[in-house]
Amino acid sequence: MNHQPTILFIPVSSPEGIGEYMRSLIIAKEICKQWPNADIHFIVSQQAPYANDCPFTTHTTPTSPTKHVKEVNQLIASIKPAITVFDASGRKSQLAAAKRSGSKVVFISQHKKKRSRGLKWGRLALTDKHWVVQPSFVLGDISVFEKLKLKLLNKTPPVNIGPVFTPVNKVEQVQILSQHQLEAGEYLLFNAGSGGHKIGEQLAADIYATTAERITQELGLKCVMVYGSNYPNKIDYDQAHLALDSLDNEQFIALVEAAKLVVISGGDSLLQTIAMKKPCLTTPVSKDQPPRICICANKGLAVAAATEAGEMVNKIKHSLENESLQHNLNNAGCNNGLVVALQDIKSLLEENDNA
């Protein structure tokens, strides 16, 4: 097998969300652990706040890479990746450019509409692996017509690999807990996603911070508020709760795993929290999140609330006494999709070697 593979990641990127980029970054870092000489490239929007912070070779487009077909296709032809990962991104012509360069193509979808997009005739013929980063209980089965298309094109169906996150490193976990003077199981962790989402005119992160403040004052519990890298305001560090601007995924997952309860928005981090069997309260901060939250709450895997401090405080109090929540999580069958992703990367590299 080629131990110096070139792998290109093209995640959805914008000034707001960060989930797709973070997922691609997690996979890229794990690839480098298995293939230390791997040549990793990213193509992201220059408007994204992480455009200048990516630890790998980074190419930028003026806005979302999906909108810049010519530029992206030229980059693909120049990089000649062994594998190209389109994380909820890409036009059919960009997938075709990857195939012309000799690349295997991976498409990642995170909800039903995006999964259906990946199963359109033209894209399906150009895709080698389709990962759905949702557990099967969140996203139902594909349609009969979609199954027929897979059969006619002799393609494997999308695989529900579940959420992708960095496994907890216990040594690093002890270090970060010590650094912030935290005890495992003795604090609540708050995070409203990347920090840039608004509920009306108010930032969701500020609503979460207000909730953390009230929980600390009313219950005397230690609360940790992670504002997120897209939070636009100056953070007041002299609050009753511990305020952190942002954490890398390894640090964030370490704090999630050691928390007593997690208060989280309904994005990728919600499913990561569930996969770690960690009790949580969740609220929507963007329009795509309510259906996912509803499914998780109906299955007893999370407590749902409106993104409003008063309701969040009341439901947090009830969640701390909800013993059935942990039982349901232990039996949910939701795991870390990173394991499947790395297995598929290995098999695709082997296919390239044997071609």
Image (cartoon, grey):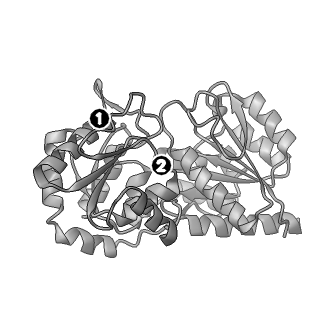
Q: Residue 138: x and y, percent?
A: 39, 58
- Check the image and report above or below for 87 versus 298: above
In-image side of 178 versus 11 (left or right): left
Tag 1 residue: 206
Image quadrant of residue 51? top right
Q: What residue appears at the point 15 percent right and 52 percent down from the top-left corner?
A: 315
Identified by mark 1, the residue type is Asp
Query: Residue 161's x, y, as percent?
Result: 53, 64
Between 328 and 193, the one lying in front of the other is: 193
Indicate whether 170 appears above or below 245. below
**Mark 1 and mark 2: Cα distance apart in space:** 17 Å
* Residue nearest the viewer, comparing 113 with 314: 314
Which residue is rendered at x = 21% and y = 47% of the image?
Answer: 305
Tell me if residue 141 comes above or below residue 200 in the rendering. below
Q: Which amino acid is tagged 2? A: Leu
Residue appearing at x 23%, y 44% in the figure: 240
- Name the quadrant containing residue 76: top right
Horizontal and vertical percent for residue 354?
Answer: 87, 69
First of labels 1, 2 by sequence position: 1
- Decide if residue 103 is in sight here: yes
Q: What is the x, y in percent for residue 79?
A: 83, 44
Quarter of the C terminus within the rendering: bottom right
Q: Residue 247's mark?
A: 2
